[in-house]
Amino acid sequence: MSDAIYHDAILALAKDRRHAGRLDAPTHSHTSDNPLCGDRVTIDVDRAADGTVRRIGHFVRGCVLCQAAAAALAASVEGQGATAFAAAETALARVLAGENSPENGIWAAFSPVARHTSRLDCVRLPLVAAKPVFEA
Amino acid sequence: MTNALRSQFPILTPGLAYLDSAATAQMPLAVLDAVRSFETTSRANVKRGVHRLAEAATDAYAAARRDVAAYLGVPASEIVFTSGCTAALNLVAHSFGALMKPGDAVLLSGLEHHSNLVPWQMLTARSGIELRFLDVDADGRIDLSGLESKLDARVKLVSLAHVSNVTGAVLDVAAVVAAASEVGARVLLDGAQRAPHGPLDLKALGVDFYAFGGHKVFAPHGVGVLWARAELLDAMPPFLGGGEMIAQVELTHSTWAAAPAKFEAGTPPIGAAIGLGAACRWLGALPWADIAANEQHLCQRLLDGLGATPGVRVLGPQSLQARVPVVSFALEGAHPHDICQIMDSAGVALRGGHHCAQPLHKRFDLAGTTRASLALYSDDSDIDAFFAGLAKARKILL
């Protein structure tokens, strides 16, 4: 059933507003679009000199999956650095390839999306937006 | 009536409410059989071979062109087969565009599908053509009150959607043709969303070009039609170069075949074109008054039900006047893709997103909408399923 995507953990992540919204004076910011649907995600971060993410904010014009992925991303990297972002990318790639792993962590909630090719980019968009921020 | 029609579409099994016909319409047995027959008895390349399969394929391809032409009320020599509606529009932008000079203008509108926008932007970038735009009114129609001020002798072409793929609004073609003729501008209609909803009499429309895709009119993917007046096809240079479109080739230069071959470089979409010919024969024999009445009844049900649903905003005409059953809506607090995903689980096939009409959605301050689009095989069970699915989506998402 294609509505298996919308289970409680995904809906809870999508409603998690703790990091929702733009930051005042971020040190880094980047916006990405999904050209197929017009969705847009902006990721703002406030990084310390050592790269640690002191604050992160996301502004999402997108679907439940996109909102949930943005929340999962924020939870994954807050207080950490580029290594945590890379780990999130790896975990999400595993999940969307249908691979189970105890290291998937919060991203395991997206497992049902792996069966829906047309929705993969919905989940990826926040990480696509965040990547330049962590490569800067 | 609908049951008899619906039974001709093998894919429309119980449990599927297919409301995405504006994206791709399904194929009836008449078309499926024609394609299968060609591919299993006559499959070969056209025009050059002399063996019997090549002869049969060439004859079938020519017959398909005649069938399409007869359905549209035009000479077969004015029918160009393309790979789709997008290719047809690009052909005009390239080849008619080649006849324009810097400072000339093309008049478009704010509700065009990207296929009738981007090719003109590309022409502008390489040729210095000016683009002008008619506004879109609150009902999702092209605002023709701007015609007089936007048209002058510099406008060489008015290129508009005959029917919006988002709002379902039907263009007042007569008004456009009358205004364009005042300044000597040609008129191109993107007929992708009009062609599935009844016969077309292109000569009576008075336009100069008409484009649509096969898969919107119950035919295979990969084929489309550009109709243009003979004098325009003769005047325009080719779009793509290659085999089949030449008269003579030398090492340094070539001359062109007469239209329509001039615009059909390479091996054409033979089987798909034969399917399109079969679709046109099939369409030409249908009881269109009954079909129109059914489509209007179902469209009214959609409009009434959506109008009674809290948080719903329909993007398009609220009445049945001059509209086809393509109904796009926004549901406050719910994303179109989430709505479509949940409704798919209820057996309802919809389309969500910007529908390749981003400027139109921007006009209404929306990133996307959810679209239900009906066709001649739609019935009340589809609408029942739609509202049951929408209730489920609202329960999960809101």
Image (spheres, rainbow, N blue to C red):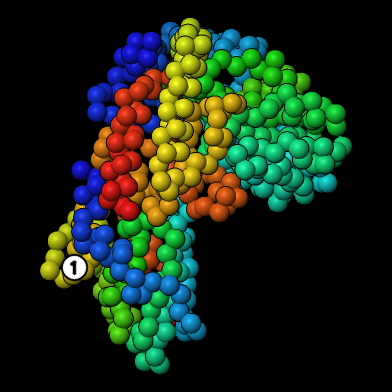
Instruction: Give the left or right position of residue B69, taking residue A29 as reference.
Output: right
Q: Look at the picture and state if B192 lies above or below B315.
A: above
Instruction: Specify the farthest residue to the bottom.
Output: A49
Specify the subunit that label 1 lies on. Answer: A
SS assignment at label 1: helix
| Relative image position of residue B382 (x, y in whole percent) | 34, 27
Near-viewer residue (B81 or B310): B310
- Identity of the residue drawn at 48% across and 22% down: B296
Q: Look at the picture and state if A107 lies above or below B281.
A: below
Q: Look at the picture and state if B141 lies above or below B49.
A: below
> Which residue, given by chain and number where applicable, does mark 1 sit on?
A104
Residue B38, quarter of the rendered image: top left
Q: Look at the picture and state if A133 lies above or below B393.
A: below
- Identity of the residue drawn at 23% across and 65% down: A107
Label 1: few (<14), some or many (≥20) within 10 Å? Answer: many
**Considering the image in quadrants, where does the N terminus of chain B appear?**
top left
- Identity of the residue drawn at 83% across and 46% down: B103
Task: Indicate the amino acid at tag 1.
Answer: Asn
Instruction: Give the left or right position of residue B176, taking residue B22 as reference.
Output: right
- Identity of the residue drawn at 31% across and 24% down: B381
Instruction: Specify the farthest residue to the left.
Output: A102
